[in-house]
């Protein structure tokens, strides 16, 4: 399995940031796709 680019702690921090502001804005700022944030939420 491919190693994740982000640790679990980093994923949680980005998700919390996405809760406060639009997901699209956070994704653009972090260089992620919006779908990545939604997939992380499922975990």
Image (cartoon, rainbow, N blue to C red):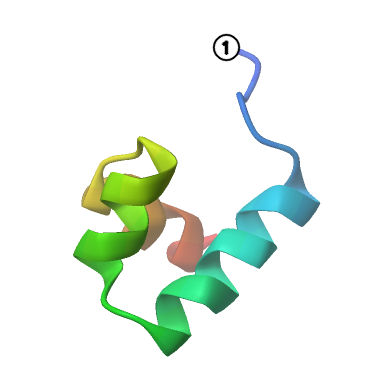
Q: Position of residue 25 (x, y in %)?
A: 26, 63
Where in the figure is residue 37, as x and y percent of width and height?
39, 56
Q: Which residue is mark 1?
A: 2
From the viewer's perspective, tell me whether residue 30 is left or right of residue 14.
left
Closer to the camera in the image, 24 or 35 = 24
Give the residue displayed 47% in from the left and 67% down from the top.
Answer: 41
Quarter of the image containing the C terminus? bottom right
Q: Secondary structure at mark 1?
A: loop
Residue 6 % position (x, y)? 65, 34
Name the image quarter holding residue 38. bottom left
Where residue 7 sits, quadrant-wise, is top right
* For residue 33, above or below residue 14: above
| Category of crowding for the residue at label 1, using alpha-carbon neighbours closer than 10 angstroms: few (below 14), some (14–19), many (at least 20) | few
Identify the residue at the far top of this view: 2
Quadrant occupied by the N terminus: top right
Q: Nearer the viewer, residue 9 or 29?
A: 29
Instruction: Please state the horizontal and vertical placement of residue 15, each as a whole percent of the image.
Output: 53, 68
> Is 42 left or right of 8, judged from the image as shown?
left
Q: Residue reaching furthest front?
A: 29
- Decide: is 30 above or below 9: above
Residue 36 as seen in the image, left or right of residue 40: left
Q: Residue at x 45, y 65 (%)?
A: 42
- Residue at figure coordinates x 67%, y 64% from the top left: 13
């Amino acid at each position: 399995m491919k190693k994740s680019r982000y640790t679990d702690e980093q994923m949680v921090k980005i998700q919390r940031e996405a809760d406060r502001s639009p997901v699209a804005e956070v994704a653009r700022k972090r260089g992620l796709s919006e779908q990545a944030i939604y997939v992380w939420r499922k975990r």
